[in-house]
Image (spheres, grey):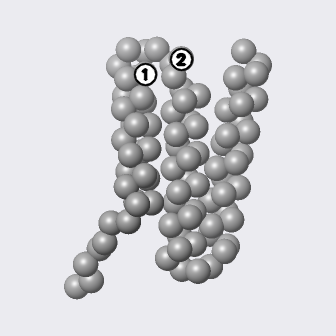
Amino acid sequence: MKEKNFDILMLFQLFFAVLAMSIGIYGKVTENYNLLPLMLILLSIMFLIIGLREYKRTKSLLWGIIYLFISLFMIFSVIEGIKRK
């Protein structure tokens, strides 16, 4: 069985996932959704890291670009939502 090795991108992905999950749990428990844009920014950074890891793993640019566009769309949506407040 192939042993999984942890690289720095996986650690960053795990870090941003834990941060986003903790902000989401905090928002749900306290019913205070003021930190929702921050959680979405963290998730978009996590998608960007997933795209970088996928490109590094497969050397195929397709999935990396798809994750990049998802990440950029999420960041754009969050910034537009913040500006409208």
Counting residues from the start of the chain, the first of labels 1 and 2 encountered is: 1
Cα–Cα span, label 1 and label 2: 8 Å
Residues under numbered marks 1 and 2 in contact, where contact means CB atoms less than 8 Å apart: yes
Q: Amino acid at mark 1?
A: Gly
Q: Amino acid at mark 2?
A: Asn
Q: Going 52% across and 60% down the picture, which residue do you hit?
A: 50
> Which of the image's four quarters has the C terminus?
top right
- Which residue was labeled with disc 1? 27
Q: Secondary structure at mark 1?
A: helix
Is 11 positioned to the left or the right of 71 in the image? left
List x then y, in percent, for residue 64. 63, 67
- Which residue was labeled with disc 2? 34
Q: Residues within 10 Å of mark 1 (few under 14, many from 20)?
A: some
Is 14 positioned to the left or the right of 60 in the image? left
Q: Residue 20, relative to residue 13: is it above or below?
A: above
Is 75 positioned to the left or the right of 9 in the image? right
> Which of the image's four quarters has the N terminus?
bottom left
Q: Going 42% across and 52% down the picture, which residue do you hit?
A: 12
List x then y, in percent, for residue 15. 38, 46
